Amino acid sequence: MPPEDEHRVQVHLDRLLAERGMTLSELAARVGITVVNLSVLKNDRAKAIRFSTLTAICRELDCQPGDLLSVRDH
């Protein structure tokens, strides 16, 4: 299996958006990325995330990277 298919990072964007009463479209506009790219991240299909994007998401959601991302067990 290629290394990029082995990642177990899980994104908790749905939960954070719900807790803050924010839509994916609203977050995308605030962060300056497309809804499609944010949706890829939300649905655990992203292979990478730029630190600048991660920083912007955390700024807008008032969270830390560990609130947004976790590593799931095998």
Image: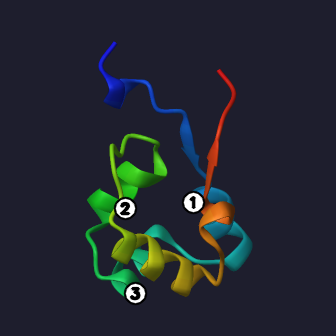
Position of residue 66 in the picture relative to residue 23 (left or right):
right
Write the residue at 33% across / 31% down. 4
Write the residue at 43% across / 24% down. 6
Write the residue at 66% across / 62% down. 66
Write the residue at 38% across / 40% down. 45
Label 1 Cα crowd, 10 Å radius (few <14 / some 14-19 / many 20+): many
Q: Do callouts 1 and 3 mark residues in contact (Cβ within 8 Å)? A: no
Q: Position of residue 31 (x, y in %)?
A: 37, 82
First in residue order: circle 3 vs circle 2: 3
Q: Do callouts 2 and 1 mark residues in contact (Cβ within 8 Å)? A: yes
First in residue order: circle 2 vs circle 1: 1
**Residue sitting farthest toward the right:** 19
Report the amino acid beneath label 2: Leu
Residue 20, picture quadrant: bottom right
- The label shown at residue 38 is 2
| The C terminus lies in quadrant | top right
Q: Which residue is mark 1?
A: 13
